[in-house]
Amino acid sequence: MTWHKLAIAAVWAGVISLDFTACGPFMVSQPLVCGPLFGWLMGQVVVGVIIGGIVQLLWMDLSPIGVGIPYDATAVTLLAVYWASLPGHGALSQVVLSLIIAVPLGFLFRWLDQLARRINTLIMHRVEKVSDANLPWALWGGIISGILWSWIRYTVAYGIVFGLGQYAWNRFGYFPRLTRVDQGLTMAIILLPVAGMGVTLELFLSDEPERRWMPWRHTKSSRKDDPTP
Amino acid sequence: MILSLIETFFRSFFLQALWNFERMQNIGFAFSIEPLLKRAHRTKESFATALRRHCTYFNVHPYFAPIVMGVLFNKEKSLAESDRTEDPTLTVLKNTMGGAFGAVGDHVIWGTWRPFCAVMALSVGLLVGYPASSSTEPASIFNAAGALLCAKWWIVGFLSMFNSIHIWLRWRGLQKAVSDGPLVVRWVESLHLQKWAEQIRRVGLLFLFSMVLVYFSRWAKSEMLIWMVAVLLGSAILKRWRMSTFFIFYLVCGLSVGMTFLEIHWP
């Protein structure tokens, strides 16, 4: 892919990531939405559907609770879709390979998000310092700069990681691999959604884990605490 | 009044635009509530004091924020109509509501509604774009036509379903909070969100099982089926044991490669 296409991909990835905190959230950044959408933008809907579906099922339970910033499954989806969409890399084993490379980078993007929110604190302090008369305008400025800062940092981060990955992919992507490794990676395409279904199953069952997972244990403890004879 | 409500409603989508570790949603909250504060306070001085007051720490689930804004509008209005310049209960009420609605939102929206919508969209998408055919061919999801159909269902189905409740909760919550004030809590109670969450989880399980059946039906005649059942149960158990999804992902990739070395191939 050319630099021009890389830049367009980074811009779109930045726009999709705005859904995290800058605007909404309308859940456009969920892997089952952003995977096919980004795949379509890259001209590879099939790749987007496979990666989006797998990542959504595996990381269904990610939630931004309190001050906790979750693992960035959106970044994993976008990076994997981009690398798997590179010309000559559409094979199913390459799709899994791109996911294998992208998965650790979810932690990198989470760290970048934490860093960006620390910089938000600086912007917030600047907004607070203005006089009462100018506060309404300062709030507008703060919100606009927050959105712009979000978009720029995501676009730049995606641009760099897309580019570095593409460079490495082009250099090492065609290294001869054992046929069995290729077959195994293709097999992973079938098994990864199943593992995701297992993770999601656990999520749905864990609402009241002590009752649903091990009902006998709950019954025992309930009887113990029950004062009635 | 309706214009102020609409403006606050649209501004509330930017609540987290300047989320920071020190005061979290403070700037977003002050920005969103500003049109309502203009309504509540007639003098420039009292409006400026009120706006400054809302630049303090605040955190809530973003979808419940308009409810807090509506309640605070009522409190600000009664403060503006009284002789007092400050009301200490206002900040206490704001933070209490933030904590309570934060907990409800995390459980009901993030923990239940979003996974439910995702599972529903995924299962319907698979059902439509992934029809059962010969077990010896790669799945139709890998074909462009099937994938496109699947993608349409996932994107349109998930977004419309999830956001119908999201938008309704924001708008109706704001309206009710402005009209009822702190009594809006009764309206939230009357929604029985916790009970609904429990029911939704049960229905979600049904959709999940249907998705598993549709997916597994493809390999009904092959030796892959037993491996798939093992992976399904194994990953659920590992997750139950607090194992990281990161680890499960690489374990399954390693297992798949290992299987081919044990002569267990793609059917």
Image (cartoon, grey):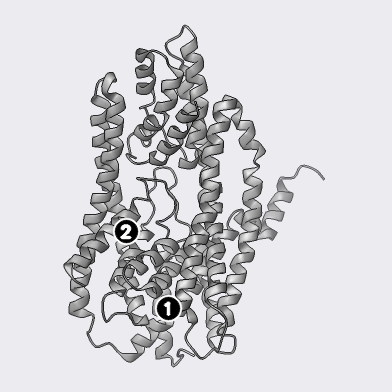
Residue B22 is situated, as x and y percent measured from the top left of the image, at 32, 35
Element assignment for label 1: helix
Q: How many marks?
A: 2
**Residue type at the position of mark 2:** Phe
Above or below, A91 against A37 in this view is below
Find the residue positioned furthest to the front: B3
Element assignment for label 2: helix
Above or below, A131 against B193 in this view is above
The residue tagged 1 is B144
The tag on residue A107 is: 2
Front-lying residue, B254 or A87: A87
Q: CA distance from mark 2 to mark 1?
A: 32 Å
**Residue type at the position of mark 1:** Ala
Residue B108 is situated, as x and y percent measured from the top left of the image, at 56, 47
Find the residue positioned furthest to the bottom: B263
Above or below, A143 against A177 in this view is above
Host chain of mark 1: B
Q: Residues within 10 Å of mark 2 (few under 14, many from 20)?
A: some
Q: Nearer the viewer's eye, disc 2 or disc 1?
A: 1
Residues at discs 2 and 1 both on one chain = no
Q: Residue at x 24, y 36 (%)?
A: A123
Q: Residues within 10 Å of mark 1 (few under 14, many from 20)?
A: some
Residue A24 is situated, as x and y percent measured from the top left of the image, at 41, 46
On the question of residue B153 being in view, the answer is: yes
Host chain of mark 2: A
Front-lying residue, A31 or B178: B178
Q: Residue at x 37, y 41 (%)?
A: B16
Q: Residue at x 28, y 72 (%)?
A: A83
Q: Position of B199 compared to A99: left or right?
A: right
Callouts 2 and 1 close, C-beta under 8 Å: no
